[in-house]
Amino acid sequence: MKEKVLDIIAAYKGVDAADIPTDKPFNDIGLDSLDVAELVMQIEDACGVEIDITPELNCIDKLVEYIESK
């Protein structure tokens, strides 16, 4: 699941997935709230899950953990 999420974010940002830290807050990796909202919609479609973004889901690791718990 993490690989799929990273691939989506990497494609969105136009960078290599290996260059994206998964434990850093989204804003630290260059994503603002509008970027995150767009990415969440893409991730929901790709993963077939509904995501309720909360302040606690502030990095890729926490987002993936949330998705895997669904």
Image (cartoon, rainbow, N blue to C red):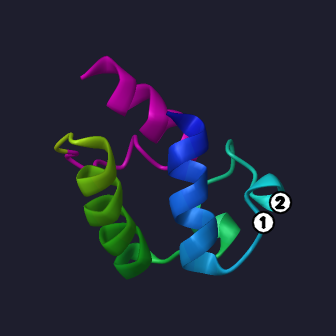
Q: Residue 2: tell me if it is visible.
A: yes
Q: Which residue is drawn at the image coordinates 44% and 40% (left, top)?
A: 63
Within 10 angstroms of label 2, few (less than 14), some, or many (20 or more) residues? few
Residue type of the residue flagged with mark 1: Asp
Q: Residue furthest right?
A: 19
Residue 2 rendering spot, x and y as whole percentages: 56, 37
Circles 1 and 2: CB distance less than 8 Å? yes
Q: Quadrant of the C terminus?
A: top left
Q: Quadrant of residue 35?
A: bottom left
- Residue at the image position 45 percent from the left and 26 percent from the top: 65
Taking the image as shown, residue 25 lies to the left or right of residue 53, namely right
Residue 25 picture location, percent across and down:
60, 55
Q: Residue at x 26, y 64 (%)?
A: 41
Q: Quadrant of residue 66?
A: top left
Q: Which residue is mark 1?
A: 16
> In the visual, does 64 lie left or right of 42?
right
Q: Is residue 52 magenta?
A: yes
Q: Which residue is mark 2?
A: 19
Comparing 65 with 55, the one in front is 65
Mark 1–mark 2 distance (CA, rounded to whole Å): 5 Å
Where does the magenta region start and end? 51-70
Instruction: In this rendered view, identify the residue nearer to me: 68 or 23.
Output: 68
Residue furthest to the top: 69
Is 63 contained in the magenta span? yes
Query: Callout 2, which amino acid?
Result: Asp
What is the crowding at mark 1: few (fewer than 14 residues within 10 Å), some, or many (at least 20)? few
Is residue 19 positioned above or below 62 on the image? below
Q: Secondary structure at mark 2?
A: helix
Q: For this rendering, which residue is in front, 13 or 60?
A: 13
Residue at position x 16%, y 44% from top? 50
